[in-house]
Amino acid sequence: MKSVASAPGKVILFGEHFVVYGVKAILCSIDKRITVTSKLADNNSIKIESSLGKIEANVDSITKLKDPSAVLMKPLIYIVTKTLEKFKKNVGVEIKIESEIPAGIGLGSSSACCVAAAASVTGLFEKLKREEILKFAIEAERTIFQNTSGADCSVCIYGGIMEYDKKNGFKKINSNIDLGLVIANSAQPHFTSELVDRVREFRENNEDLFVSLCEQESNLIQKAFSALEDRDLHTLGKLMSENQSFLERIGVSTQKLAFLIEEAKKTAYGAKITGAGGGGCVIALTDKTNLNNTLTRLGKHVDCFSARIDYKGLLDTF
Ligand code: PMV
């Protein structure tokens, strides 16, 4: 018995950081996936294998493992142990994770892994509804990111483009825009919680400015909805670059990110940080006319790759 599920990574097109203070954000899933394959094992042990390492232990002792791989795999351990508990099964499980999404650079690898693992492991016993998998994946991700908003897990389950805000949760945006993204990895380490703290301090010290930036970001996002509907890449690109200027004002850009963004803008429609900033990735908006030029230009400085929007979301086969 084998159960396979895969889920896409994501980028934030608009609204990171401001979303923490109630502004809308726009996210989309990308065509880079994590695939999780689960199998039942005869013994009572749990075995997990991924690029983060390999762990194996008895069902009863796996939560007590202290080695670094086990700490990183806490959400996966949670998913397996809770699933066995829920279905009252006294069996072992082996899971293997294969990823096309680089880890730890803000492309949602952790959420994609939780979603794919939640679907794959529960799929050994019963096919759960999307909403149930979403809830389970968010619970698992909270074992390492206490404050996750759940937006990343939502977009990778349902795929496509979505708006998200803290009060109303997520809502799918019905656009079938076909855009090309160039994703450039600054290779600067990126710690979301530190950056969120930095923005909180900025807000405390610059109250009026921050309120005004939130308003400007909200207006910008309204314009982005129209540009998505009209499939207007020129306007969308300009809005991304404008969003970047707000991110620079709140102090989450770096010299390297700003340099990559300026380079990208020479050929792309627009560019910005995606995610928390302070490092991590830059995204540049292109189509087939300027994708290769932008890739070549950024590729001279850092690792980069192209991505499109994924409209499939979670895929599972049992
Ligand atoms: O860098 P990421 O993908 O973890 O994105 C963080 C997005 C923030 O808005 C900075 C934080 C949040 O919880 O929304």
Image (cartoon, helix red, strand yellow):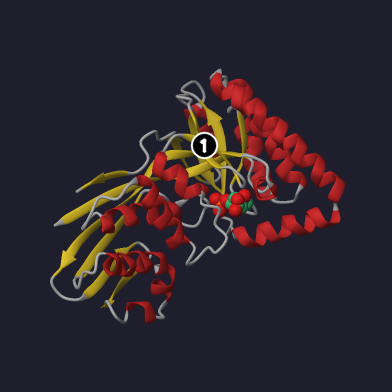
Q: Quadrant of the N terminus?
A: bottom left
Is 106 positioned to the left or the right of 55 in the image?
right
Quarter assignment of residue 73: bottom left
Above-or-below relation of 51 to 222: below
* Residue located 31% across and 82% down the image: 61
Residue at which label 1 appears? 171
Depth check: give the residue in front, 28 or 137.
137
Q: Is residue 276 visible?
A: no
Is 209 positioned to the left or the right of 227 in the image?
right
Position of residue 28 measured from the top left corner of the image (x, y, whole percent): 49, 38
* Residue located 27% across and 76% down the image: 59
Above-or-below relation of 43 to 37: below
Is 5 positioned to the left or the right of 218 in the image?
left
Quarter assignment of residue 23: top right
Position of residue 303 measured from the top left corner of the image (x, y, whole percent): 49, 46
Q: Is residue 94 visible?
A: yes
Determine the secondary structure under disc 1.
strand
At label 1, counting other C-alpha atoms closer than 10 Å, the crowd grade (few under 14, some 14-19, many 20 or more) is some
* Residue located 22% across and 75% down the image: 45
Position of residue 173 measured from the top left corner of the image (x, y, whole percent): 51, 30
Is 113 positioned to the left or the right of 195 in the image?
left
The three-letter amino acid code for the residue at tag 1 is Lys
Above-or-below relation of 178 to 170: above
Q: How many marks?
A: 1
Position of residue 256 measured from the top left corner of the image (x, y, whole percent): 65, 48
Mark 1 Cβ and ligand 1 under 8 Å apart: no
